[in-house]
Each structure stands twice: as C-alpha cells, then as structure tokens.
C-alpha cells in the first residue's frame, strides 16, 4: 500500500512539473538580441558622412567613397521607400542633430499570432557606438486583430522615437482592408519608458510627418487608398495637439528639423484650377504664378536657418519629358523680413534637393532625367545622377552645368538610378 501511494505521489509530482514546464514555455519571453559590436576600425576622418541602405543593412560613407563602415551587419534592417510618389524612407530615421540613427529590423519568421512588419526598434550613434534595443514587439501579448508595425519618427528635441502600430480588421465588412486603425506609441531614449501618444481619430494608413515638442503637436497624413479621380492625392494632413484638438486639411505638410516651422502645401483635386495659398506657420506665402504645390516631390530644410527647398515635377522622366507639365522646377521657401515667400530658382530647373548636412555645409541632390534611361523611358523618379555639392557653391547662383562640374557624384553611373536613389537616406554628423 505504501509503495502504491509513493508511486502515485511521484506520478503527481512529475505531472505537476510537466504542467509547470508547459506553462513556463507558454509565457517564455522572446530570446535576447545581442547588440552588434561597434564597427572596426571605426570612423576615420572628419567626414562629411552619408547614410545608405544596401542589402538590408545600413552603411556610412564619405561622398567620395574612399572611407566608410557598416552601421549594421545583421541583414535584417526593414527599410522601405515611402508609399506613393514622394521621395523618402520608412524604417530608418536620422535624429534632428544627425548624431543618432533609429532603425527597425525583422526578427525571424513571424508567427500567426505575432505582429507583422518589423519586430525590433534600435538606436545607434552615428559612429556605430552605443547601440541599444528600444522596443521588442515580441514581448507584447498576441494581438486580437491583424497588427502591423509601421513607420518611425524622431521627436524634434531628439529625446523620443515614435512608431505606428496599424490594426487591420479580419473581416472586410468592419473596415476596408486598406484602412486600419492606427495607434502611435513612443519610447524615451534616456529611460526606455513607453507611452501611447494617441490613436488616430479615423481609420486609414498613417504616415508621420513631424513631432514638434515645442508646439506640442504631432503631424501626420492619413489615406484610405487613392481615389481613382485623384491619382496625385496624398490624403488628409492632420495636426493633432497632444493636449487635445485636431485639425484636418487636404494638404501636404513638412516640419522643420527644430520643430519650429510648419510648411503647408495645398493638395487639390484636378478640377480645381486655383488651389489655396501655401502657408508658413499659418501665414500665407507669396508665390510666383507658375508654382504648382500639388506636384511637390521633396521638401529639404536647412538646419541653421528657416529655409527650405522644394522641387515641383510629376515624378516621371525619359520619353515622358515632353508631356511633363508642369516642367521640373526648384523653389526656395524662406522668410524675407516679416513676409514668407517662395522664390523660383530658375537656373536649376532639373535639380531635386534631397537633404542638407546637419551643419548646412553640404547638399545632397539629384538631377531629373533629361533623356530616356531604359526602353520604357517612363520610370518613376528617373534621375541622371546623384550628387553632393558644397552649399556655398549651390547658393552662388551659377549655371546648372557649372554646379554639376563642381559636384561629387555619389551614385554608381552604370546602375539604373530610380526612385530608391540607390539607397541613400541622408546625412550624419
């Protein structure tokens, strides 16, 4: 009898241990990610430095390409070009001062109950040191709906990084598939503290446009698909005061790196001949008669002064050049005295200004294709070259040919230079 009771007790103990083991397996945290070591031999020389996305990794190099280093080596960086006709990137964001890079990675094959998109949000210093894992989405409970991690964005003071979580309804009757509910969360770099900033007041794909700590405002565009009669529509531009209050416009917006200045460019349907005036911090801009804000492809801000350059064109090149209306044109937006105005830079009609270095000493730019680049000839954002120039030369009002002759070519001429711009993202300090 005692032997039978002892065996029964041992069996119960073994069963309890098995159940405890299975329970632990069910709640086991995701495996840790070991940070990569700093690049070796590391950064050498004063720069300037360009950040580039290539083969699912981030690379840093000088414009001449004679020195550089790998910022990541996992091959899992999930950077993607912006959706639509704009030039830019999701999944990688340079801090306002150019000293840090936030980026996202995929971590293995996602399961049926995991969050889609990316899984890991990292931050690293521009020289490759100080890498930290800020967010691991695998630690979250399994979502009830189909959830995808989307774009990321720095706050204007560089203290936090925001990221978008999109929740898609499993039944299309509840919401159209392309119209998720979006929640914006943020993580503080100093403490690792996370918070929910807001949930978008309406469903739709959400693209962050700026987060001004100084103004207490978050800016984003929202769109549920592209209406068939508005192929150039960018959806609604939403200003959300984090203390409460929402303003929604049919426009495109761009925030200066310091979070102080907001440029609003109206985006009107085709049948409207006269769009509303562009706004600079709520004040109407003086614009030339040939200014077409609907086709603005890129807004590039300087860091040390309230000046922005924007390029107007439809985004097509090659054989389509004859029908390109309006033709490519470069404009300078600045405050002259007390009146903000838009100035047409007539000597640079084929130039797209992409980004100024953090010290405003250099400019990264592309030349819109003036001849067919392939058999089709109508590739989206076809460019002849990607170049770096000193800002002083760029602003000297020389001819385009003189500017190009004094520039450094950073692309690979033998490769097709299309919309992703061969992976170039921007400048580091």
Image (cartoon, rainbow, N blue to C red):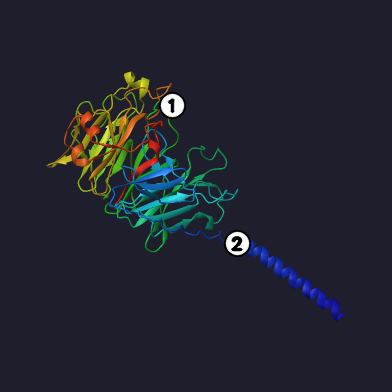
User: Which corner quadrant holds the N terminus?
Assistant: bottom right
Residue placed farthest to the left in the image?
Answer: 337
The quadrant where residue 196 appears: bottom left
Residue placed farthest to the right in the image?
Answer: 1
Q: Nearer the viewer, residue 308 or 100?
A: 100
Q: Earlier in the sequence, mark 2 or mark 1?
A: 2
At which x and y percent is residue 257? 28, 48
Q: In the rendered view, does 166 fall on the left or right side of 361?
A: right
Q: Can the viewer see residue 4? A: yes
Q: Nearer the viewer, residue 376 or 170?
A: 376
The quadrant where residue 6 appears: bottom right
Q: Can the viewer see residue 151? A: no
At which x and y percent is residue 161? 38, 54
Give the Cα separation between the discs numbered 2 and 1.
47 Å
How crowded pointer 2 is (Cα within 10 Å; few <14, some 14-19, many 20+) is rated as few
Residue placed farthest to the top in the image?
Answer: 322
The quadrant where residue 284 appears: top left
Q: Nearer the viewer, mark 2 or mark 1?
A: 2
Label 2: element kind: loop
At which x and y percent is residue 366? 31, 34
Q: In the rendered view, does 255 fall on the left or right side of 377?
A: left
Q: In the rendered view, does 118 fall on the left or right side of 256?
A: right
Residue identified by numbered label 2: 27
At which x and y percent is residue 394? 21, 37
Residue identified by numbered label 1: 228
Q: Please count the marks in the image.
A: 2
Q: Residue at x 28, y 36 (%)?
A: 265
How crowded pointer 1 is (Cα within 10 Å; few <14, some 14-19, many 20+) is rated as few
Q: Is residue 290 above or below residue 221?
A: above
Q: Residue at x 53, y 49 (%)?
A: 115
Label 1: element kind: loop
């Amino acid at each position: 009898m005692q032997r039978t009771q002892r065996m029964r007790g041992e069996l119960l103990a073994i069963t309890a241990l098995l159940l405890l083991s299975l329970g632990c397996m069910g709640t086991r945290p995701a495996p840790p990610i070991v940070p990569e070591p700093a690049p070796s031999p590391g950064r050498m020389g004063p720069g300037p430095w360009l950040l580039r996305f290539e083969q699912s990794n981030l690379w840093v190099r000088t414009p001449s390409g004679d020195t550089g280093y790998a910022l990541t080596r996992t091959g899992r960086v999930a950077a993607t070009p912006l959706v639509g006709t704009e030039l830019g990137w999701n999944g990688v964001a340079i801090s306002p001062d150019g000293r840090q890079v936030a980026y996202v990675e995929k971590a293995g094959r996602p399961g049926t109950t995991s969050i889609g998109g990316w899984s890991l949000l990292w931050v690293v210093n521009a020289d490759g040191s100080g890498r930290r894992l800020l967010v691991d989405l695998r630690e979250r409970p399994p979502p009830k709906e189909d959830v995808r991690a989307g774009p990321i964005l720095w706050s204007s003071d560089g203290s936090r990084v925001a990221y978008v979580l999109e929740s898609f309804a499993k039944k299309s009757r509840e919401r159209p598939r392309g119209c998720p509910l979006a929640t914006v969360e943020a993580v503080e770099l100093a403490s690792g503290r996370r918070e929910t900033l807001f949930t978008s007041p309406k469903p739709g794909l959400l693209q962050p446009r700026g987060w001004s700590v100084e103004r207490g405002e978050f800016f984003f565009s929202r769109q549920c698909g592209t209406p068939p009669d508005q192929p150039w529509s960018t959806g609604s531009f939403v200003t959300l005061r984090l203390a409460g209050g929402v303003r929604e416009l049919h426009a495109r917006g761009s925030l200066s790196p310091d979070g102080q200045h907001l440029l609003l460019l109206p985006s009107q349907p085709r049948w409207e001949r006269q769009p509303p005036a562009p706004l600079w911090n709520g004040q109407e801009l003086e614009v030339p008669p040939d200014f077409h804000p609907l086709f603005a492809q890129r807004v590039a801000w300087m860091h040390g002064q309230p000046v922005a350059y924007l390029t107007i064109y439809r985004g097509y090149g090659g054989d389509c050049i004859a029908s390109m209306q309006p033709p490519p044109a470069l404009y300078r937006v600045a405050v002259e005295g007390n009146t903000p105005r838009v100035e047409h830079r007539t000597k640079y009609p084929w130039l797209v200004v992409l980004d100024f270095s953090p010290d405003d000493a250099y400019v990264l730019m592309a030349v819109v294709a003036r001849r067919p680049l392939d058999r089709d000839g109508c590739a989206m954002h076809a460019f002849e070259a990607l170049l770096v120039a000193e800002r002083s030369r760029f602003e000297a009002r020389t001819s385009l040919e003189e500017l190009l002759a004094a520039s450094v070519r950073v692309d690979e001429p033998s490769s097709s230079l299309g919309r992703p711009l061969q992976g170039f993202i921007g400048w580091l300090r």
